[in-house]
Image (cartoon, helix red, strand yellow):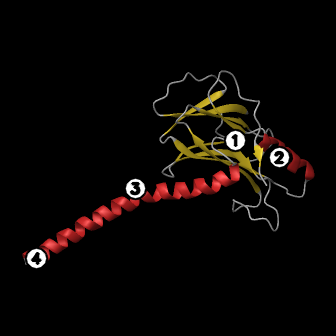
Amino acid sequence: MREVAFWVVLTLIEAVILQLAIVWFSPRVVSRLSARKLLKFAGRWNILGYRGLPLAGRQGLTTNPDMVTAFGIYDVSQGPVRIACTIPHWDSYWSISLYAWNTENFCVINDRTARSGEFDLVIMSGRSRQQSSEREEVVFSPTKKGIVLVRMLVRDRNDPEELERVEAMMRKTAMVTGAGQGPLRTAAIEVRS
């Protein structure tokens, strides 16, 4: 009887250890695999990559063909990362989402929840201190590295004027390292093909 109890307890301990290892490691493995793919797309850390609208015959990184998407991977270990955000002034969905390295979605701002039409989203590590201005939204990342996703809806893919407006709006979105004073409006999004 003791031998059976020993094996049952040993099996339960192994199951708990295996479960904890899977729960802790799985999100980090997913982030690393995603980061590798997104780094090829964006080109380097702290830059947003934007490919344009998904077209027929070209594989997209998004599942919705009416959604333009920009991706990037941030790293706040060397200092804050700033993302210049411009929300469309016409009725169209726009959002920015931040994901920690463990895949936790810790920040979502969309066209309805943003305080203004133009602002800088400043991503900082949990230990950083910074005074925010009226044009800044300061967010503390639970991890040093993470993923940025910017999305915008295209209502009519056949309307050249709307496509031009959407493209211009997405190109105004920029991500750079550093949290200097004043709004960030000089950098541009990198277009990847």
**Residue 107: which quarter of the image?**
top right
Q: Is residue 117 above or below residue 5?
A: above
x then y, percent, for residue 129 = 50, 25
Q: Which mark is residue 24?
A: 3
Q: Is residue 74 above or below residue 157?
A: above
Q: Is residue 53 left or right of residue 38?
A: right
Whole-number angstrom distance, CA of label 2 to CA of label 4:
69 Å
Amino acid beneath label 1: Asp
Mark positioned earlier in the residue sequence (3 or 1): 3
- Callout 1: helix, strand or loop? loop
Residue position for label 2 = 167
x then y, percent, for residue 43 = 69, 48
Amino acid beneath label 4: Glu
Residue name at image x 80 percent, y 56 percent? 53
**Mark 2 in CB contact with mark 1 (< 8 angstroms):** no
Residue position for label 1 = 111
